[in-house]
Image: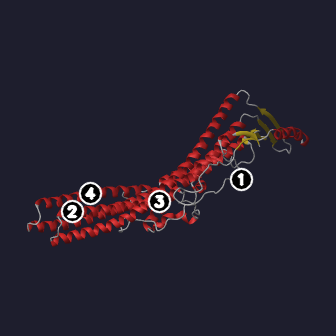
Amino acid sequence: MLRQRFLIMFPLGILLAGCADMGAVFRTPEIELPDRYSLVAPVQAPSRDEVNWWRNFDDPVLDQLVAQGMAGNLTVAEAQARLREAEADARREGVALSGNGRVDATTATRSDDRFDVGLDAQINLAGEARHRSRAAQARFEAAQLNEVEARRTILSEMAQAYTNMRFLQSTRVTREQDLRSRRRTMRDIQKQLDLGEATRLDLLRAQSLMAETRAEIPRIESDIIQQRNRISTLLGVPVGALTLDLGYKGQQPLPKRVADIGVPADLLRARPDIRRAERLYAAAVSDVSAAHAARYPSLRLSGLITTPFGSGASSESLLAGLVVPVFSQPALAANEDATVARVEQAYLQWRVAVLEAVEEVENAQVLLQSALAATKASREAVELNRQSLALSRELVVSGGNITVLDVLDRERALSASRTSLAQNQRDVAAGYIALRVALGRGHPLVQDEPEPDTEVAGETVTQAIITTE
C-alpha cells in the first residue's frame, strides 16, 4: 500500500513543482510631492498627542460630544458592520486556510456494515486561491480604514456643528445687546423730541432699526435649533432626546495653540482615506493575479476510504486528474483584461486621494491664517466702534455738533463689527478643525505598514506585468 501511494504522489509532486505560482508584481505606489506646504517652512511632524486635537479648544462640552459621537454615531456603526462583512468575505475566500488548495466537497456515508468517506478537491496549480485570499485580506484592511475614515468624518462634522452653534448663540447675544442699546437711543431721542431738539423722523429711524434687530432674532433661534438637531443626529439620538446642556456660556470655542503640520509626504500614512485607496489598489493587484492564475490548469483529486465494521481492514482509492480550461480561455482572458483595467482605476483613485488631501491642507491653512488675521482686526474694530458710540452719546446729550442719525450709524457699526468678530472667530475654529482633519489627525493608526509578504500596489499601472514569482 505504501508503494502504491508513493507511485501516485511522486508524479503529483513533480507536476506541482513544475507549475510556478503566477502573480502580478507591483511596487508600493509613489507620487511626487513638494517637500513643504506653500504657506509654511518644513516643520516637524505632529506627535501622536495631536490625535486628540479637539482638546486644544479646552471645551468640556465638545469633549463630551466627541466621546458620545464616536460611541453612538450610526454612520460609524454602519462602517463597523461593513467591516464585519469584509471579515466574513475574507474567511469565505480562505484567508485562514493554508496553502493553495480549497476543498469543494467532502461527503461521508454510513451503512449497516461499513463507513465511507469521500473527498473531492480541486487545486489551482498557479495559486488562484492564494491570490484571492490576498485580495480579500486587502479589502478587509480597506474596510478597517473605512471605519477609521468614518470616525474622522464624523469628528469633523461634530466639531463644525458645535462651533457653528456657538457662533449663532454668540450672534443672538449680540443682537440682544443691540436691542438694549437701541432702546436707550430711543429714550434719548424721545427726550430730545420732547425738548424740540429732535424730529419725528429721527424717532421713526430709531424705531425702524430696533424692529429690524428684533426681526433677526427668530431667524437666529431657528438656525441654533437646526444646529442642535444636527448634533443630535450625529450622536445617534432622536431630535429632542439630547440631554447634554448646550446652553451658551458666553464664549466661542477657540484653539489654544496651533501645532506643527509636518510635510505633504506625512499624509500618505496619516490619512485613512489614502491608505484605504492603497489597500483597494493592492486588492486589485491580487485580482489580476487570480484572474491570470485561473487560465492555468487545476489538479482535481477524488478519493474514497471504506472501513468495514468489525474488521481492521480498510480500502482506499485516490484519483488525480488535470483540469485544463481550454474552451473557456477567451472568457478568462477577457476577465483578466477587465481586472487590469480595474487596477488602473484603483491607481488613479489613489493619486486623486493624495492630491485632494494636499489641496485640503493648503486650503485649510489659508482659511486659518486669514481668519486669525481678520479676528485681530475685528477686535480692534469692536473696541474703536464702542468708543465712538460712547462719545457720540455724550455729544448728543451735551449738545455737541452731532445728530441722532450719527448715533444710529455708530450703533450699526458696532453691531456689524461684533458680528464680524464672531464670524471670524468661528472661521478660526473652522479652519483649525479643517486643518487637523485634513492632516489625518483625530484617529489612532490602524496599521503603519503593509505586511512584508503581501502584494502591494505599483508605481505606475504599466508595471502590472505578469511575471513568474
Q: Earlier in the sequence, mark 1 or mark 4?
A: 4
Q: Earlier in the sequence, mark 3 or mark 4?
A: 4
Query: Is residue 389 shown left or right of residue 339?
Result: left
Depth check: 29 or 403 in front? 403
Q: Earlier in the sequence, mark 1 or mark 2?
A: 2
Q: Earlier in the sequence, mark 2 or mark 3?
A: 2
Give the residue number, with chain letter if any, for mark 2: 408
Give the residue number, with chain letter if any, for mark 4: 216
Q: Report if residue 76 is visible in the image.
A: no
The total number of labels drawn is 4
Secondary element at tag 4 = helix
Q: Earlier in the sequence, mark 1 or mark 3?
A: 3
Tell me whether circle 1 and circle 3 mark residues in contact (CB < 8 Å). Answer: no
Give the residue number, with chain letter if any, for mark 1: 452
Give the residue number, with chain letter if any, for mark 3: 433
Q: Earlier in the sequence, mark 4 or mark 2?
A: 4
Residues at marks 3 and 4, CA–CA distance in whole angstroms:
28 Å
Mark 2 closeness class: few <14, some 14–19, many ≥20 residues within 10 Å: many
Question: Where 204 sits versus 2, above or below?
Answer: below
Q: Position of residue 275 (x, y in %)?
A: 60, 51
Residues at marks 1 and 2, CA–CA distance in whole angstroms:
72 Å
Kind of residue at disc 4: Glu
Query: Is residue 200 shown left or right of residue 160?
Result: left
Kind of residue at disc 1: Pro
Kind of residue at disc 2: Leu
Q: Position of residue 75 (x, y in %)?
A: 49, 52
Q: Position of residue 259 (x, y in %)?
A: 52, 65
Residues at marks 1 and 3, CA–CA distance in whole angstroms:
35 Å
